[in-house]
Every structure is written in structure tokens, then in C-alpha cells.
Image (cartoon, rainbow, N blue to C red):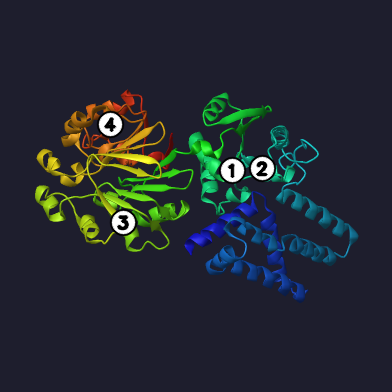
């Protein structure tokens, strides 16, 4: 309730502005309260104003109005119902009528006019008005952009035009050319919910300081957006051209592009997303999605991340083709346990896990470990469950998956840390690119894996072992040849200088390889696996 009151108070302060108009209004209310004559008018204005403030500022009624009537974003319009101008004018007339002499009335009138002028802001000033740029009274940039699109569409026989552009132009495009559609309207800027998940992702990218043009291109294809207008920048033009956008025109401020890739060209490519947790803890949660809507999930994080994971999967259609649990530690399998107990509308076709030794055997080898989530997972009756082993190959909707590490007798010979070193290390391959997921595999396995698989481990992208803290040896990471490295770690772990963690060392190792570094600081981090 305190939060609701704070919202109303903030909007009231904004409505008041910097002038003294509301102070004059309350001075008139006080005058009417002390006025013995005109009881009917006094009771009308005083009663209405008092009732308004009770309803508007009382948290319960305010919350009801926000939720069921006009919405929180425009609650400030409630203050339009205050009879400020009427009360001021009514009070002024009463005061003038009480003056018997014309000269006195004239002086009072002039005094009131000056007071009103001094306590407000003149409407006709430079800050309120600007010269019109065209007869449509909308930004000329919008006119230019729409005209460029219409000319290009006419020349190319394109009948469906759907534009992605910056938020500042959203409300004007449809005013000028209703034939040009957009994935969302200006309501998105006001914070209102966007119904379609792909459109919501486009808005998220366009609202961010750093633009992921690959991900934007993917979501644009899913939404059928074939045009892009963005502030003129040759660096951006080069970046978007690699994502299929061709520059078709420009004015002084904007470049306009058309997407030249058709939806079929995305076949066999996957958008991989790395997510961070809400609690500031290391965890592992990835999704992989192709243009046909197939979804693969890797781990999910802690139990406390269960609802977050559930909502993300709801955005993706509530259908998971394959869910990989790399190992049963709580920061990897906890969310899955929470969701699988009550999946609701979520459908999971297949689950893949490592056939670990029992929780008791794991604790016998590593007494310091924890197996609470593993015991819960161990007791579950998971349908369509497949245990994977080193050397297995899988195919999920065209995505090729090679298993390089999973618990077996050789892990016992090399390590006591069975849950980490026995976790699933695997590579996913699309048409021409691949990504290696190391889960929590550690240094005891480095030499063995390098010797056994060699160049087969090479990949374009790399998920760092054990969140980048500890994990595999430096020479293992260097041998992968990855152009980007994903650290499943929050800022405190990434930036630690105490020497307790090895995250910064591993960041240096990958930076020396000229790999781009991803962490929870910028999640969701997304790449298109070509």
C-alpha cells in the first residue's frame, strides 16, 4: 500500500509542475471555507475536492482504479478531475462582486490577472511549441522513412510491410502510413504488456543500449518484419548487412534497410540464449530455439529460479523438445525439479541426463558435496528419460549433439568429485557452427578429454566449466579455439580480486585468445549458431 501511495504522490508532484497554480487553487479553497455566503457553492466545491483526494490518494481505491480502470501508466490523468480553473474563477468572481466601487474592482481584477500570470507558465512559449516540419505535423524523418519503404515495396512487389524502428518514432509511423505495420506500438514504451513473445524480444533489444543485431534479425524473421529504420551510422550499417539487411535509402538522420533473407534461410540455425538468476548466484540455464519453434533447454538453475524458468518457457510456447540436465547439483537441476513436480501446461518431450552413481556413493567419494536436489531427482518418475554416455550422438530437430563426457568407471579412476567431473560435456552443431558445453567438468578430466578427443572438441563458442571458476585447465580452453566464452557467473564472481576464485584468470585466458566474454552482467546473452 505504501508503494501505491508513493506512485500517486509522485504523479501528483509531476502534475503540479514548477508553477504555483495548485497553491492558488488551495488558497481559493481556504477562502471558500472561511466564506459565510454562497453556502451551496462552497459545499459543492469543498465536498467534491475532499472526496477526490480521499479516493485518489487512498491506496486501496487508487490500486483498484489503476488495475481495473485506467492503468498505472496514465493514473496522472485523474488529476484532470480537480476543478482547479473553475474554483479559481468562481472565487475570483465572488471577490470582485464584493467590491462595491468600479475602481476597486478594476484594481482587484488587474491584481488577479497578474497573480495568475505569475503563478503559472504561459502556454504560448518556445518550450511548448515548435515550427511544424510538414503539413502532417509529424517528424519529417517519419515521412521520409515511410516514403522510402513504400517506394521500395512498390518496386519489389512487396505487399506486406512490417517495420522495426526506434521507440521515438513508433506513434508517428501509423499516423502517416497505416499500411506499414509494426511488431508493437507506443504502448510498449509506456510499459504495457506485449502479447507476442517475439515482439517483446524485439522491443527489449531496441530499447537496450547495446543492440544484438543477429538476435534482432532472428526475432524479426519470426515476426515477419521485413524493414528496419535506424539512426544513420555506417558501423551499424556494416553490422546489420551481415544479418541480411540491405540499405535501400536514407535521409540526413536515418538509414532504411530491407531484410533480404527469407524465413527458409534460417533452417538449421539456432538462437542460443544464456540467462542469469535473480538472486546473484552462479547457475546454468540456456535455451536453444530454431525458426520452426523447436526448443532445447539446458539445466535451469536453482529451485528458486523455477518460476522464472517456467515463465521463459511459456514465452517460447510451453513445449520443450529436449531438456538436458548436465548433472544433479542444485544450481543446475533445482529448477527442473520444481517445474517437473507441477508442469502445468508445459509439455516436455524428452529428458536427457547422466547416469550418476547413487547420492550415497557420491557423498562417500566427496563428503563435502551436497545431494539434496539429487535425492529429489533420483526419486522422481521422469517420463521419456534417456541416460547418455560418453561417445553417444543425438539428433534433436536437426541439431547434432555429441557427448564427450558423462559419468562412467573412468571418472572414478581420475577424480573423487563425481558429480562435477561426471557431468555432461557435449557439443551442439548446427549447419556450420558449434558450441561446446562443459557444465561443471573440472581439471582432473582435462588431459584425458584432450588426449581422447583432440580436435573434435574444437567449437566456435564455449561454455566455461564450473561457471569459469576452477573448471578445466587453461590449455583445454585454449585448444577449443572459441570466438566467444560464456561465464555462468554474476558480477561478484567475475570481478573478484581476493584470489579465492580463478574466474578472472580464466577470463584473461580467453581474452588472450581474443574471445568475446559473456556473463550475467548482460543476460540474456544471445548468439545465432549458424
Front tag of 2 and 3 = 3
Side of 186 relative to 103 (left or right):
left
Answer with the quarter of the image where residue 56 lies: bottom right
Q: Is residue 322 visible?
A: yes
Do residues under tags 1 and 2 come within 8 Å of each other at their CB atoms? yes
Residue at the image position 80 percent from the left and 53 percent from the top: 113
**Pointer 2: what residue?**
160
Answer with the quarter of the image where residue 466 lies: top left
Badge 2: few (under 14), some or many (20 or more) residues near its Cα, within 10 Å? few
Disc 3 is placed on an element classified as loop
Residue at the image position 37 percent from the left and 28 percent from the top: 483
Residue at the image position 28 percent from the left and 54 percent from the top: 385
Badge 3: few (under 14), some or many (20 or more) residues near its Cα, within 10 Å? few
**Pointer 1: what residue?**
224
Q: Indicate the quadrant containing the C terminus: top left, top right, bottom left or bottom right.
A: top left
Give the Cα distance between marks 1 and 4: 36 Å
Q: Which residue lies furthest to the right in this view?
A: 102
Q: Is residue 211 visible?
A: no
Side of 448 relative to 6 (left or right):
left
Give the Cα distance between marks 1 and 2: 9 Å
Side of 400 relative to 73 (left or right):
left
Q: Where is residue 42 in the image (x, y as percent from the top left)?
A: 73, 72
Give the Cα distance between marks 2 and 4: 44 Å
Side of 456 relative to 317 (left or right):
left
Disc 2 is placed on an element classified as loop
Q: Position of residue 188 (x, y in %)?
A: 58, 49
Give the Cα distance between marks 2 and 3: 42 Å
**Pointer 3: what residue?**
384
Residue 125 vs residue 437, the one in the foreground: 437
Q: Which of marks 1 and 2 is nearer the N terminus?
A: 2
**Pointer 4: what residue?**
457
Badge 1: few (under 14), some or many (20 or more) residues near its Cα, within 10 Å? some
Amino acid at each position: 500500500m505504501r508503494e501505491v501511495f508513493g506512485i500517486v504522490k509522485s504523479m501528483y508532484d509531476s502534475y503540479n509542475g514548477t508553477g504555483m497554480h495548485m497553491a492558488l487553487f488551495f488558497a481559493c479553497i481556504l477562502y471558500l471555507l472561511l466564506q459565510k455566503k454562497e453556502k451551496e457553492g462552497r459545499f459543492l466545491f469543498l465536498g467534491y475536492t475532499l472526496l477526490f483526494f480521499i479516493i485518489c490518494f487512498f491506496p486501496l481505491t487508487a490500486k483498484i482504479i489503476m488495475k481495473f480502470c485506467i492503468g498505472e501508466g496514465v493514473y496522472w490523468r485523474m488529476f484532470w478531475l480537480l476543478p482547479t480553473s473553475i474554483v479559481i474563477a468562481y472565487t475570483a468572481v465572488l471577490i470582485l462582486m464584493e467590491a462595491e466601487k468600479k475602481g476597486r474592482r478594476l484594481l482587484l481584477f488587474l491584481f488577479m490577472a497578474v497573480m495568475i500570470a505569475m503563478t503559472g507558465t504561459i502556454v504560448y512559449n518556445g518550450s511548448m511549441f515548435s515550427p511544424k516540419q510538414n503539413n502532417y505535423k509529424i517528424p519529417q524523418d517519419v515521412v521520409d522513412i515511410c516514403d522510402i519503404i513504400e517506394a521500395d515495396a512498390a518496386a519489389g512487389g512487396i505487399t506486406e510491410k512490417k517495420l522495426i524502428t526506434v521507440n521515438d518514432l513508433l506513434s508517428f509511423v501509423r499516423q502517416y502510413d497505416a499500411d506499414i505495420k509494426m511488431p508493437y506500438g507506443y504502448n510498449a514504451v509506456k510499459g504495457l504488456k506485449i502479447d507476442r513473445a517475439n515482439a517483446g524480444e524485439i522491443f527489449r533489444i531496441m530499447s537496450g543500449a547495446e543492440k544484438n543485431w543477429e538476435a534482432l534479425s532472428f526475432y524479426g524473421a519470426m515476426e515477419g518484419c521485413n524493414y528496419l529504420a535506424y539512426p544513420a551510422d555506417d558501423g551499424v550499417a556494416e553490422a546489420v548487412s551481415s544479418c541480411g539487411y540491405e540499405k535501400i535509402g536514407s535521409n540526413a538522420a536515418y538509414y532504411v534497410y530491407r531484410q533480404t533473407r527469407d524465413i527458409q534461410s534460417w533452417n538449421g540455425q539456432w538462437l542460443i540464449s544464456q540467462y542469469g538468476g535473480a538472486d546473484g548466484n552462479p547457475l546454468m540455464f540456456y535455451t536453444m530455439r530454431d525458426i520452426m519453434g523447436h526448443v532445447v533447454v539446458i539445466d535451469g538453475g536453482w529451485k528458486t529460479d523455477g518460476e522464472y524458468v517456467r515463465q521463459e518457457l511459456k514465452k517460447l510456447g510451453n513445449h520443450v523438445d529436449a531438456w538436458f540436465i548436465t548433472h544433479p547439483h542444485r544450481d543446475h537441476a533445482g529448477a527442473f525439479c520444481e517445474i517437473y513436480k507441477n508442469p502445468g501446461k508445459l509439455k516436455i518431450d524428452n529428458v536427457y541426463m547422466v547416469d550418476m552413481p547413487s547420492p550415497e556413493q557420491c557423498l562417500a567419494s566427496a563428503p563435502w558435496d551436497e545431494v539434496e536436489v539429487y535425492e529429489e531427482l533420483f526419486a522422481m518418475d521422469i517420463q521419456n528419460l534417456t541416460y547418455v554416455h560418453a561417445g553417444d550422438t543425438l539428433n534433436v530437430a536437426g541439431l547434432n549433439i555429441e557427448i564427450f563426457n558423462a559419468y562412467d568407471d573412468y571418472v572414478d579412476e581420475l577424480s573423487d568429485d563425481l558429480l562435477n567431473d561426471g557431468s555432461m560435456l557435449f557439443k551442439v552443431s548446427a549447419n556450420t557452427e558449434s558450441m561446446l558445453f562443459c557444465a561443471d567438468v573440472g581439471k582432473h578430466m582435462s588431459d584425458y578429454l584432450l588426449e581422447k578427443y583432440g580436435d573434435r572438441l574444437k567449437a566456435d563458442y564455449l561454455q566455461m566449466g564450473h561457471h569459469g571458476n576452477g573448471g578445466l585447465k587453461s590449455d583445454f580452453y585454449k585448444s577449443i579455439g572459441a570466438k566467444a566464452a560464456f561465464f555462468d557467473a554474476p558480477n561478484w564472481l567475475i570481478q573478484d580480486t581476493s584470489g579465492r576464485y580463478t574466474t578472472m584468470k580464466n577470463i584473461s585466458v580467453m581474452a588472450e585468445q581474443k574471445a568475446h566474454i559473456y556473463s550475467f552482467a548482460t543476460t540474456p546473452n544471445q548468439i545465432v549458431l549458424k
